[in-house]
Image (cartoon, coloured by chain):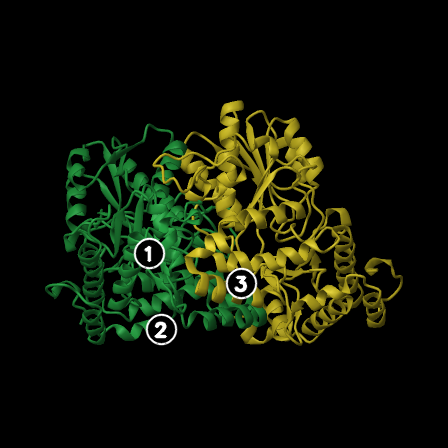
Chain colours: A green, B yellow
């Protein structure tokens, strides 16, 4: 059992060791190849390497590509991969009888489902021309909206809100779609998907959810929550590998009418008749477009399979135990430093990462990384620590906070090398 | 020297062996892992495995992902991969000072460049609302046009022609863009890119070229040929691996104004400032969208590097020698069978594959594959043989035709197992 926030008084490393001994999820750590001596708190940006991934990737490369070659489309079921892996992700996110495919990137998938959602609304409620989203949403989500609005060129507009309290005020009769990322990439703040979707539907709009920081990080039931569309990536908490293909989910009630603006061969009803006219496949496959990167796609399945073995409620308990532990330890052991917690303290409003502002955030994070504690930095001033319950221990949190204490107490971040900006932050 | 069509009288296997001994490109065959006993004539659908690909893929998986983890974006230059590999492909296709990136799929890239081209024309020549293409184009190219026309919803239309002779008649004052695939996926017919682009420009339209069956198969000079935009895949003649990311090229004169409808984080001018407003990058990077599948992308570079080592004129000579040899041998050794050559006999109108119609084409191809000669079948009735000069020998062509002779003479295709359709043809 992960205990995290249940202990009283000053937390010791021994407390953390004891909690690890009682952790029923502890064995999952052995399923990953973790670099020695590294405390990796960036699984919400790029997950770690599952032990089975190298063999799977090598088999796809040598046996499927190298030996079976073009025959792999049938023999090794390449054609069915987006649907097969999508079905697994669908189960993981509680997709119910909706459809899910693994394909393309989150951004491209968002373009498809937003295009489909706006088209549905154009038929059912033609006056609605507003897309509501959060100013603090993933920027790429907002960029996709912007590109879509431009090409539609019909007076669609993006209305940005600053958080949950602004939502009702923004939900006018002109709103077609609300696009929200369930867990904020910077603060870790969590939207209540069910309650929020109900508010969105009550206002006559459709709900599109970005699950990039949710899938594999907390229990999801997108179908029961009433969501209309969802997208997400697989390279964060699902440990699918760098840039592994994303997923896309559509509620069953929309499957027959939802049409993607990106219409390619893999989404055709009869892709091998080579007809010049497009006819969408009957189900979720209509959201497939071009030929997928098989090495990345097939390798990603290993991470998804691992995620499916985890009890999601247990995962959530450990996630909250570890994020609470991180917050508690920072407050106990690092008083007097200008660290401002921007992650919600209420557990029901928290995803699976913890973020603090610090005026020297960029240099502090580089100093931490140099000491073997890998989190990341997000503008402005934000130190972000991803807490992946699958492979992190309570002692990792204790050790990480201890390194943070040393970096701040000893002002290690002042070293000139930590002031220099990298190309990618 | 590849000789193919220079010999006189009946061609023998010894003639082919002699030609192979004189083949200055022969050593490239050793750069690939070819399955024993297989004659692989489907490199125009999925290229073979370069010997260096396994090591590269394994290093990316184990060292870059497994060990360097998120640090790979800087340390292992992941962020620059689409541009670095794109620059190499740009050199290979004669992209001049235009911009090229490796990213996404051909279909998605086509959507981007068609969207950009139509936007340019909407500004410069707003009355033009017709996209001209070939009825025999890759179906997915036509599907992409169809999806784009639907979302634009401004009376754009697709005008299909049946071949080069119809082009001038179709080039009215209403034509915005002409989209052509340089080498027809079925017949292998080759468009003259320079002359055709000149005709398109003379009519006031922009030329978008699909190079899926061209890149790595024949010398290209897209910039000198006057092309406006180009896309293509890397898993055919470039041997990049199954579904490896595609490429996208934009002429230098359009770079500053060309805007993609798919606007994502990787195409932003300052992707790490996390601004809510989209601002396109200055150059070709603006056509990047979401996070790319790094395993597939990085592994693909091995095939591109190999292609860059080949003299493209020499490649073309050998390609024509082998395709001519295939045609000559079929005509000499398989008279009396209902095989109809649909590939142009004139070399300057031929790509790098050879296709024949046969009323039992599907079963004939399955029988060939069962005998170790792998081509593919395309509706309707077409036997397609991809001739990749990098790893094929003259004796492979001789042996393949000999197997085809036996399949037809002995009517091996009549076996019931060869009548059953696979999921993927």
Name the spot of residue B111 as percent of width and height, x first: 48, 41
CA separation in Å, label 1 and label 2: 18 Å
What label sits on residue B270 in the rendered view? none
Check the picture and name the quadrant holding the N terminus of chain A: bottom left
Residue drawn at point x = 63 percent, y = 45 percent: B90
Q: Is residue B69 above or below residue B200?
A: below
The reply to whether residue B140 is in sight is no
Residue at 52 percent of width and 56 percent of height: B297
Q: Quadrant of residue B319?
A: bottom right
Residue A147 position, x and y percent, is: 40, 36
State the residue in front, A226 or B8: A226
State the residue in front, B147 or B339. B147
State how far apart marks 3 and 2 are (Cα): 38 Å
Q: Are labels 3 and 1 assigned to the same chain?
A: no
**Considering the numbered disc 2 on the image, is that residue within a helix, a strand or a loop?**
helix
Residue position for label 3? B425
Q: Closer to the observer: label 3 or label 2?
A: 2
Q: Nearer the viewer, residue A376 or B374?
A: A376
Reading the image, the residue beneath label 1 is A44
Q: Earlier in the sequence, mark 1 or mark 2?
A: 2
- Depth check: B210 or B85 in front? B85
Q: Chain of mark 1?
A: A
Q: How far across and down, in percent of the image, does residue B73 sit?
A: 46, 53
From mark 3 to mark 1, how far is it between C-alphas?
40 Å
Report helix, strand or loop for mark 3.
loop
What residue does disc 2 label? A31
Residue B260 drawn at (x, y percent): 47, 37
């Amino acid at each position: 059992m992960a205990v995290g926030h249940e202990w009283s008084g000053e937390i010791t490393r021994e407390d953390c060791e004891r909690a690890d001994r009682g952790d029923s999820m502890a064995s999952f750590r052995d399923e990953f190849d973790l670099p020695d001596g590294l405390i990796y708190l960036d699984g919400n940006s790029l997950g770690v390497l599952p032990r089975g991934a190298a063999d799977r990737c090598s088999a796809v490369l040598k046996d499927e590509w190298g030996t079976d070659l073009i025959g792999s489309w049938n023999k090794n079921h390449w054609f069915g991969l987006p649907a097969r892996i999508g079905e697994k992700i669908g189960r993981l996110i509680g997709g119910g009888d909706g459809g899910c495919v693994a394909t393309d990137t989150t951004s491209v998938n968002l373009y498809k489902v937003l295009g489909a959602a706006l088209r549905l609304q154009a038929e059912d409620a033609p006056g609605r021309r507003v897309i509501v989203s959060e100013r603090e949403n993933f920027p790429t989500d907002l960029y996709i909206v912007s590109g879509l609005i431009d090409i539609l060129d019909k007076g669609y507009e993006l209305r940005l809100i600053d958080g949950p309290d602004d939502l009702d005020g923004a939900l006018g009769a002109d709103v077609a779609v609300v696009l929200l990322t369930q867990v904020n990439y910077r603060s870790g703040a969590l939207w209540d998907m069910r309650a929020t979707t109900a508010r969105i539907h009550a206002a006559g709009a459709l709900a599109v959810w970005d699950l990039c920081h949710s899938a594999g990080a907390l229990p999801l039931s997108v179908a029961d929550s009433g969501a209309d569309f969802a997208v997400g990536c697989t390279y964060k908490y699902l440990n699918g590998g760098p840039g592994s293909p994303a997923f896309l989910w559509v509620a069953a009630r929309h499957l027959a009418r939802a049409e993607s603006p990106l219409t390619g061969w893999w989404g055709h009803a009869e892709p091998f008749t080579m007809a010049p006219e497009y006819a969408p496949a009957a189900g979720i496959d209509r959201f497939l477009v071009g030929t997928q990167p098989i090495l990345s796609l097939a390798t990603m399945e290993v991470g998804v399979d691992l995620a499916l073995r985890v009890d999601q409620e247990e995962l959530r308990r450990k996630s909250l135990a570890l994020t609470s532990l991180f917050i508690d330890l920072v407050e106990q052991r690092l008083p007097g430093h200008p660290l401002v917690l921007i992650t919600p303290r209420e557990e029901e409003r928290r995803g699976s990462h913890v973020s603090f502002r610090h005026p020297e955030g960029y240099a502090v994070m580089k100093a931490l990384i140099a000491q073997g504690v890998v989190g990341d930095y997000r503008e402005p001033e934000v130190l972000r620590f991803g807490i992946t319950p699958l492979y992190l221990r309570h002692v990792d949190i204790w050790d990480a906070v201890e390194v943070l204490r040393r970096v701040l107490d000893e002002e290690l971040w002042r070293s000139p090398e930590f002031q220099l900006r990298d190309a990618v932050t």
